[in-house]
Image (cartoon, rainbow, N blue to C red):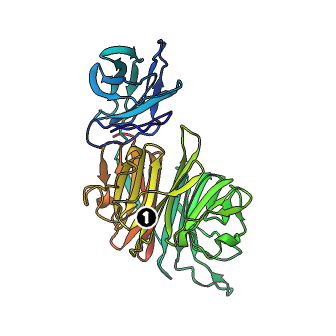
């Protein structure tokens, strides 16, 4: 594999078959080398069973880098030529490591058979796996005067969780003793000990809420039109560009930087004062959006998936990065796509009819999913994570799976549904919450992780 020719280059070369997953809070060690030209600098970022190693040098034309782990040669590769004092940067991935294990890496530059420069030695410790040890509790709501379902969930803290949708109970959808209509509920709130049914109205009317996104306990968005400030539910005017569209998901960095996606290819951005439409070029419903601020560049990267999951009308992947909106290659993916989650520049997941992991370095290669039955057996509606050693996905028939940085565990025997699905899932700390329907009732599965493996 040849590196591309740019002033700063990042290529990924693999030493073993693909099993790469980055842990949350990667450890980075960078120590400049005090050598005369050509200088050679080595830095590293540790995952769970892998390490990302970046070699930077100058005046490297005709040179070859030899990379060692614990004194043993692991890889040698040629660096691209540079001019005018530019730096050559190459990143390789060393895999097959052990979790929570220490390693020592070093590099040397060889020119004409002689060592021209040596890098600093980098010590790193791979991250540990997270625990699969969840205890599950299933709670059902409503289903008396209508079909109930919960479509989304946001975990703020162990004592503050919101789930949204529509819930019809024995007391709703009828007239009270004074002749007043009793509307359904459209939210439930967890206070650390119990779930409380809640009504969040808009213009004094009931509405089915499909999405909830929380920046903090005092800044929670219910769809794009109601915001909780910790005291009150604040109704926001619906802009013309959103009228007639259904909002499927919300994501943002703050209440002044908010994105929504939905039906008929809807993508829109809110800057705190007004909305702007982003033309997607498709009429497909956009099912999910995820984003993060790139720790290297400081820019926001967004990823969106579009598909009619019940009918083959095609598929689309969209990315907004460095201010540019464009489609992403979708070769290898099923037409039925439901969700996306990623850690910028490292690992990307697409979920739907299968779970498809991909490294950023494999961007132009076809997506490949885990073989059926190995990780999941049913359609996956949502995938989320806190780091690449703590990823959870949920879907049809109550299937919930968790990745701990090294392997997946399927909780179907504990979370199964006989006539329904989990449409959304969230994870934070030791808590996983999945929401959906066990027809005709709404259902919540809460998993509490034992701190011991």
Q: Say if residue 354 shows up in the picture.
A: yes
Is residue 408 shown above or below 98? below
The quarter of the picture where the N terminus appears is top left
Left or right side of 220 for 15: left
Left or right side of 279 for 407: left
Q: Hey, which quadrant is residue 393 in on the image?
A: bottom left
Residue at 34% in and 55% down? 366
Furthest toward the right, the residue is 273
How crowded is the residue under tag 1: few (<14 C-alpha within 10 Å), some, or many (20+)? many
Q: Percent from the top left, x then y, of residue 154?
A: 53, 57
Where does label 1 land, which residue? 338
Q: Percent from the top left, x then y, of residue 258?
A: 63, 56
Q: Nearer the viewer, residue 174 or 335?
A: 335
Q: Say if residue 194 shows up in the picture.
A: no
Q: Hey, which quadrant is residue 174 in on the image?
A: bottom right
Is residue 172 shown above or below 425? below
Is residue 244 shown above or below 66? below
Q: Percent from the top left, x then y, of residue 24?
A: 45, 40
Residue at 29% in and 43% down? 18
């Amino acid at each position: 594999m040849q590196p591309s020719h740019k002033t700063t280059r990042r290529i990924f070369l693999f030493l073993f078959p693909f099993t790469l997953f980055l842990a949350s809070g990667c450890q980075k060690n960078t120590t400049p080398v005090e050598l005369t030209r050509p200088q050679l600098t080595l830095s590293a970022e540790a995952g769970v069973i892998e390490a990302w190693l970046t070699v930077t040098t100058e005046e490297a034309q005709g040179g070859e880098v030899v990379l060692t782990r614990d004194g043993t040669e692991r890889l040698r590769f040629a660096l691209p030529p540079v001019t005018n004092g530019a730096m050559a940067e190459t990143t390789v991935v060393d895999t097959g490591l052990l979790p929570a294990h220490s390693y020592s890496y070093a590099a040397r530059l060889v020119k004409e058979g002689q060592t021209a420069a040596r890098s600093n030695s980098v010590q790193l410790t791979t991250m540990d796996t997270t625990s699969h040890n969840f205890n599950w509790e299933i709670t059902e709501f409503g289903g008396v005067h209508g079909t109930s379902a919960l479509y989304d969930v946001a975990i703020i803290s162990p004592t503050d969780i919101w789930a949204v949708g529509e819930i019809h109970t024995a007391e709703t959808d009828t007239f009270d003793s004074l002749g007043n209509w009793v509307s359904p509920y459209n939210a439930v709130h967890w206070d650390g000990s119990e779930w409380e049914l809640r009504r969040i109205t808009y213009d004094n009317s009931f509405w089915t809420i499909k999405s909830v996104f929380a920046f903090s306990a005092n800044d929670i968005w219910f769809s794009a039109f109601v915001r909780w400030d910790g005291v009150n539910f604040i109704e926001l005017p619906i802009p013309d560009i959103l009228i007639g569209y259904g909002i499927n998901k919300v994501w943002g960095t703050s209440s002044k930087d908010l994105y929504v996606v939905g039906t008929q290819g809807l993508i829109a951005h809110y800057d705190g004062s007004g909305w702007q439409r982003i033309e997607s070029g498709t009429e497909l419903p956009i099912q999910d959006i995820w984003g993060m601020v790139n720790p290297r560049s400081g820019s926001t990267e967004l990823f969106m998936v579009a598909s009619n999951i019940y009918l083959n009308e095609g598929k689309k992947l969209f990315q907004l990065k460095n201010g540019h909106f464009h489609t992403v290659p979708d070769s290898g993916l099923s037409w039925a796509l439901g969700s996306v989650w990623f850690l910028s520049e490292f690992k990307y997941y697409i979920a739907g009819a299968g779970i498809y992991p991909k490294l950023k370095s494999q961007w132009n290669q076809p997506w490949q999913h885990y073989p059926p039955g190995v990780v999941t057996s049913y359609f996956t509606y949502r995938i989320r994570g806190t780091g690449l050693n703590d990823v959870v996905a949920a879907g049809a028939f109550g299937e919930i799976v968790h990745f701990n940085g090294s392997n997946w565990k399927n909780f179907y025997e504990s979370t199964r549904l006989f006539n329904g699905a989990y449409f959304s899932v969230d994870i934070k700390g030791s808590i996983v919450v999945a929401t959906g329907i066990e027809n005709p009732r709404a259902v919540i599965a809460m998993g509490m992780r034992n701190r011991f493996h």
